[in-house]
Image: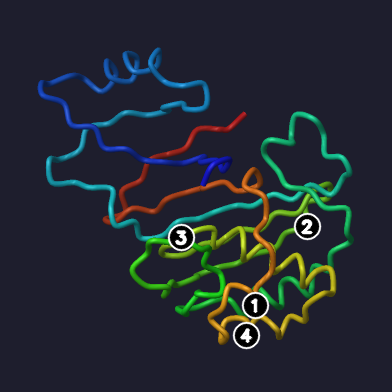
Amino acid sequence: DTGVHARHQIALLEVGKHLPPQAIHLGIQPFLPPGVSVFRVTSVSEEWRPRPAVSRQYHYFIWKAVPPPLFYRPFAAWTHHALDLDRMCEAAELMLGERDFSSFRAAGCTSRHPIRRLERVMVLNRGPYWEVRVTGNAFLRQMVRILVGTLVEVGRGHLLPSDVSEILEKKDRSAAGPTMPAQGLFLWKITLPGDVSFDIPPTC
């Protein structure tokens, strides 16, 4: 989605001749756009592919201040509403498992089916901001943003935590909450098959 961010992403590059990873790492930097940074290049076998991922973890940030700090605005949504953490956590529990997430699927989604598995949904009160962590095997178009929008509606008291079960059963996008703004969403971590790990450096 336009406007979202990725802290962790993996690309496979095939080259026609042998080049040491360090040479590729240094050589590619001048050609990258300002919003992209390659933090590691490594060699893999010809058979290795970064798909299918075992799981993906997204983090969504909602700043509490109005307006949010200037330099945080491209990286967080915001709300001036008081949110009830306990209600949101109760609703999050009802989203876990393998389910039909048609109610959390944006129009134009090209996925072959709406069945996805959510392993964890956490709502964290970080003082000046809210953080929602969502981990699953795969996601539908704007699924996390709709999921967070629904949790915010629960936190505001516009929905009951138990309403989440009914929303899932309806399999209707209009039953769920609003789609949250793109800038608050980060693809945080990808877990690859075979326990392949690419360490992520500090973000600041």
Mark 2 element type: strand
Give amino acid for label 1: Ala
Foreground mark, 2 or 3, reads 3
Mark 1 and mark 3 lie on one chain; the one further toward the N terminus is: 3
Residue 125 at what x, y percent from top left?
A: 78, 57
Residue position marked by numbered label 4 in the rendering? 165
Mark 1 element type: helix
Residue 20 at what x, y percent from top left?
A: 21, 20
Residue position marked by numbered label 1 in the rendering? 175
Residue position marked by numbered label 3 in the rendering? 108
Label 4 to label 1: alpha-carbon separation: 11 Å
Give amino acid for label 4: Ser
Q: Are marks 1 and 2 in contact (CB under 8 Å)?
A: no
Label 4 to label 3: alpha-carbon separation: 24 Å
Q: Which mark is residue 199?
A: none
Mark 3 element type: loop
Residue position marked by numbered label 2 in the rendering? 125
Label 1 to label 3: alpha-carbon separation: 17 Å
Mark 4 and mark 1 lie on one chain; the one further toward the N terminus is: 4
In the rendered view, does 176 fall on the left or right side of 47?
A: right
Q: Residue furthest front?
A: 108
Foreground mark, 1 or 2, reads 1
The vertical placement of 54 against 117, above or below, is above
